[in-house]
């Protein structure tokens, strides 16, 4: 760490200390039945600390610490411990932790088998320039649509060495990958995101029971943010939109051969690698996920159980080496999981502070039929970006937005498209969101640098989406 970075870190931690003191004092003056604007303090602290220190876990812990000092400065340690235990014992968290570790294990097996190397060699025949490499990355992202985690890890891991060859920054690679993860998942009605949304829409009577799939198809044209985010990628890849903001600096360094990277999956080189060891495990994952009603956890378990004998039959590895490889894949996902768990704790804290309710209640007086889609997109995008909760925002906002759209006689498909778009923007842009963290891991850069360099492009897509929601509303 150079002197400038050490100074920024010291400034960040000093600011964090005074923020904690302020949070403790604030408890004496805040009516926690009506926190209001003060509910934004933890989120602001997280974003500010991340920008100064460029550290994710520490920034999230600071936000949580400030929030619990606001709620109860005497018993804040116990409250933090209790919340962490609640998060870790929650079924959704356990499911995500299991999925993330197992996908990491599957990617490690594919890499160990030489499948990643073989696929990279095959792709290199078609990716003969910087632009074509980025376009191929984009196409891969469009194909692996069933789950955003698998998309982010498989595509990023496979393409990073080829992108290094053509002096593409890891941050640009991460942007390309992230733009086809959650955005693609909501546009294909047989992905994990779409299945979750269809169930949620049916549960809230947006669609009749059993009619959710057909109803969701009608919404897809109105999920503007996802369409724009995906279609921007080839435009950026061809250089028609020049590198913006922090991406410019990352690209300039890469052009000089300076590739800034973090610990990530390193592509293993083997003699006579077979592309079968790349295609079959991923195909089994996708087919098994579909077979088990789009349960990706079941899908990845089946894929691993299928890949193990595949490697043994080819005499690529012994059973003990395969187990060690899977465990190393688990270990490589430890830091991303710490970030995700910390963000879940922050989400629980925001619920206690009433952040979502405050923002939604503040926006309701300004809503009418014409502006409802636009306001829905803007408000929920800010909420998703600030909280790092995307499916959670859907669950909180839908019971409010849908009845309001009915009462105002607003355009229902357009409004629901705005709601879905908002969650996608949050997943795409949030500094500490799970998609950001997993994508950064696959591409080999830090979550902070990925989020910061991607933000201008996500902002362009958001502004264009706002214009469309305004015009059609």
Image (cartoon, rainbow, N blue to C red):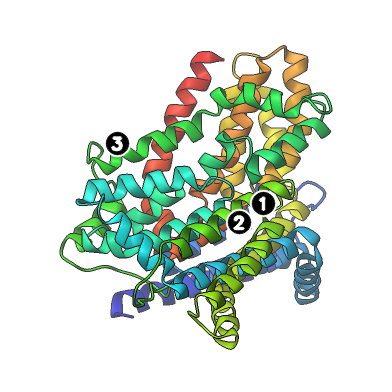
- Location of the N terminus by quadrant is bottom left
Q: CA distance from mark 1 to mark 2?
A: 6 Å
**Can residue 266 be seen from the camera position used here?**
yes
Q: How many marks?
A: 3
Q: Where on the picture, by quarter, is residue 256? A: bottom left
Where residue 350 appears, as percent x and y from the top left, is: 71, 54
Residue at position x 59%, y 88% from top?
320
Viewer-side residue, 87 vs 48: 87
Give residue 235's mark: 3
In the rendered structure, are the residues bearing label 1 and label 3 in contact, judged by CB atoms less than 8 Å apart? no
Q: Counting residues from the N terminus, which is met first, the one under dot 2 or under dot 3?
A: 3
* Residue 377, image x, y percentages: 58, 31
Residue designated by label 2 = 285
At x 36%, y 53%, the residue is 453
Image spot of residue 17 (x, y percent): 56, 74
Against 90, residue 399 (above or below) is above
- Which residue position is annotated with label 1? 289
Neighbour tally class for label 1: few under 14, some 14-19, many 20 plus, Cα within 10 Å = many
């Amino acid at each position: 760490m150079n002197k400038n970075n050490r100074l920024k870190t010291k400034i960040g931690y000093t600011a964090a200390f005074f923020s904690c003191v302020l949070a403790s004092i604030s408890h004496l003056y805040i009516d926690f039945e009506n926190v209001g604007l003060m509910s934004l303090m933890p989120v602001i602290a997280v974003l500010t600390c991340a920008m100064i220190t460029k550290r994710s876990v520490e920034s999230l812990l600071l936000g949580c610490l400030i929030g619990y000092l606001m709620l109860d400065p005497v018993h804040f340690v116990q409250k933090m411990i209790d919340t962490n235990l609640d998060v870790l014992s929650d079924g959704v968290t356990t499911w995500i932790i299991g999925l993330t570790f197992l996908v990491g294990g599957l990617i490690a097996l594919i890499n160990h088998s030489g499948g990643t190397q073989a696929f990279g060699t095959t792709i290199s025949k078609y990716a003969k320039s910087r632009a074509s490499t980025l376009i191929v990355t984009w196409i891969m992202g469009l194909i692996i649509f069933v789950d955003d985690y698998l998309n982010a890890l498989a595509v990023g891991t496979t393409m990073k060495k080829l992108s290094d060859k053509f002096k593409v920054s890891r941050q640009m690679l991460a942007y390309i990958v992230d733009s086809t993860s959650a955005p693609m998942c909501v546009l294909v009605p047989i992905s994990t995101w779409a299945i979750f949304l269809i169930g949620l829409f049916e549960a809230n009577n947006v669609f009749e029971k059993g009619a959710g799939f057909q109803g969701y198809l009608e919404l897809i044209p109105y999920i503007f943010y996802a369409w724009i985010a995906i279609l921007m990628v080839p435009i950026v890849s061809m250089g028609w939109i020049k590198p913006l903001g922090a991406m410019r600096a990352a690209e300039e360094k890469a052009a000089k051969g300076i590739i800034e990277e973090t610990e990530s999956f390193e592509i293993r080189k083997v003699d006579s690698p077979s592309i079968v060891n790349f295609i079959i495990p991923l195909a089994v994952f996708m087919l098994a996920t579909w077979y088990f009603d789009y349960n990706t956890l079941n899908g990845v378990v089946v894929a691993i159980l299928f890949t193990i004998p595949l490697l043994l039959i080819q005499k690529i590895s012994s059973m003990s080496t395969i187990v060690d490889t899977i465990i190393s894949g688990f270990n490589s996902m430890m830091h991303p999981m710490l970030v995700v768990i910390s963000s879940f704790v922050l989400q629980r804290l925001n619920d206690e502070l009433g952040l979502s309710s405050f923002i939604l209640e503040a926006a309701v007086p300004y809503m009418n039929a014409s502006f409802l889609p636009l306001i829905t997109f803007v408000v929920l995008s800010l909420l998703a970006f600030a909280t790092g909760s995307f499916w959670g925002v859907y669950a909180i906002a839908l019971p409010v937005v849908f009845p309001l759209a009915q009462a105002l006689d607003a355009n229902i498909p357009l409004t629901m498209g705005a709601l879905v778009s908002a969650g996608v923007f949050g997943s795409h842009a949030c500094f500490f969101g799970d998609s950001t963290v997993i994508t950064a891991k696959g591409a080999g850069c830090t979550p902070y640098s990925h989020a910061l360099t991607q933000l201008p492009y996500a902002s362009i897509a958001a502004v264009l989406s706002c214009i469309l929601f305004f015009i059609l509303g």
